[in-house]
Image (cartoon, coloured by chain):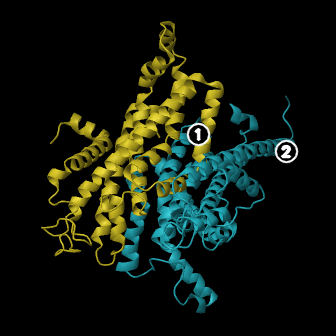
Amino acid sequence: MLPRAVKNALGRHAMLLIGLFIVLGMSLAALLAPAIAPYNPDALHLNHILEPPSSRFWLGTDRLGRDVFSRLLYGGRVSLWVGFVAVGISISIGTTLGLISGYFRRWVDETIMRIVDIMLCFPSFFLILAVIAFLEPDLINIMIVIGLTSWMGVTRLVRAETLSLREREFVDAARLAGSSTGKILFCHILPNALAPVLITATLGVAGAILVESSLSFLGLGVQPPTASWGNMLMEGKAVIENAPWLSVYPGLAILITVLGYNLLGESLRDIFDPRLRR
Amino acid sequence: MPPLPSHARRHGRLTAIAANVARKTLWMLLVLWGITLISFWVIHLAPGSPTDMETTLNPLAGEAARQRLEALYGLDRPLHVQYADWLMRLLHFDFGNSMSADSRPVLTKIMERLPLTVGMNVTAMVLTLLIAIPVGIVSACRRNSLLDRSVTVLVFLGFAMPSFWLALLLMMLFGIELQWLPISGLTSMHYDQMSLWGKFCDLARHLTLPILVYTVGGLAGMSRYMRACMLEVLQQDYILTARAKGLDEKNIIWRHALRNALLPVITLLGLSVPGLIGGSVIIESIFALPGLGQLFYAAVMARDYTMIMGNLVLGAVLTLFGNLLADICYGLADPRIRSAKDDA
């Protein structure tokens, strides 16, 4: 039996713990993929094409006889990479614009907020599709485009925080002490607005992973033979009647990963930002 | 100020809503212009051209053929001239002709596809609301009950579920394993020989799985949001007053709380339009349905500029229209909304 205090803490933070466990587990699996994977993800086992899961190929093999488990591990690297870089881009843009908007107010604020309104009305998945198809789908382009089309929420959030923080005494003090505007924005205001930004970033990783896998599923994301969960599902769909395992495990990997980031983000929000609690 | 007679108040409210709508419409036109500006330049400056399909990839066509084709599509002119020309035509609702081999008007091609996509989305939206509203209410009223907790778990799963994977799973279960429903296309092979009722049933069978996927996609967000709004409303003073008056719980929830909790949900409906449009590309491609999403996908692949722009404009118009509709409903449902309130 666990002591009651530990039990209570576990109960209260169950969401956080599960989320953390999934996120850490998936990250580790992706980072250590070369060590864990039983086979080279691109190695063809031509005698073992479309084999169902077995003790030799844990999650079966695909149409070219590649080991699904190994490919899943390497696909995880793609998802993680896209998630983090895309969110890095969108957070950088969103934070900068939000700080500027909230701090300078007037026409600067007005202009930036109107741009945000316009971007929010964009059928953004359409635009992402169009741009990716034109630019040759590769990992870098995907990350940039996802980042460039997902910064609006962060901007609004940071702007709101900045609007209230800029009136506080410590900002006046910094101004009196002769700090430059850049220093006030990034060294004094930003750290105080960091909690909601990090929470949004966590949820953003989940969103970016979903968009990347959708693009790859449509054939416009990560290009074969490089494994990604989306393009594994695309390849699996062609043989869905004979080899259902190809259509199950990559999807499960996406579901669990996205779930992990969402759980982590939502529970962090509950803990750090009671105002946003729903 | 003495209270106005009710018909005058009503009149005042409608005027306020009308003024608000007029102002919003003006703003929407500006947004629409901004969207066309950004997308036109992004798409035209990106590498590749609509002529690639017929020239660069065709060994029989030379440089001269490419130039002739470019002149035909007007692509040899400076970009700002092309944009001005395109915008002028748009003002007359002329989206130009498709830059593909069939050269048919963009608007005609879009209109052929629109009913299917809109029909599926509207059906799914109605289903979503029919399920999500009661679920949200019950979860909120029995907060932390077993039911609420199970709904929360399902909601998190729903948020994390990629729509295309759900589609694949449903295809495997209902299409392949149970053989209940067809897994692709809009109609069966001998559709033309069916009776009217038979045609209807055939369509319904083909559309069941896609609509189910759309519905599940919207369900998680909507029920979670409904629950949150309901929780917020239930903490308000007027609910306490209603309880103090001795109203029964049913009355309080369905008449007093629900009305106010529904308001933000209306806004969410307006905001969900871009997501639905994007989702249709994926869902229509999985189920091989000839809708707008598939048309757009094909246009992107062929770099059919006019077609892509037509779709983007239409998508933006639908989004803006959704927002406007939400605004109007909001105005009608909430007497506190006045045109001045937005400016605050």
Instruction: List x then y, in percent, for residue B57.
Output: 48, 68
Q: Quadrant of residue A6?
A: top left
Q: Residue at x 59, y 35 (%)?
A: B237
Quarter of the view holding residue A194: top left
Q: Secondary structure at mark 2?
A: helix
Palette colour of chain B:
cyan
| Drawing shade for chain A | yellow
Nearest the viewer among B292 and B66 is: B66
**Chain letter for mark 2:** B
Report which residue position mark 2 lands on: B11
Q: Does dot 1 land on a helix, a strand or a loop?
A: helix
Q: Quadrant of residue B306?
A: bottom right
The residue shown at (63%, 37%) is A114
For residue B278, side relative to residue B79 (left or right) = left
Give above or below for A50 relative to B247.
below
Look at the image and tell me whether residue B257 can be seen. Answer: no
Q: Which percent across, then down, holds residue B302? A: 53, 65
Q: How many marks?
A: 2
The residue lying at 62 percent from left, 66 percent from top is B69
Residue on which the image places disc 1 = A116
The chain letter under disc 1 is: A
* Viewer-side residue, A1 vs B292: B292
Q: Let me know if marks 1 and 2 both belong to one chain.
A: no
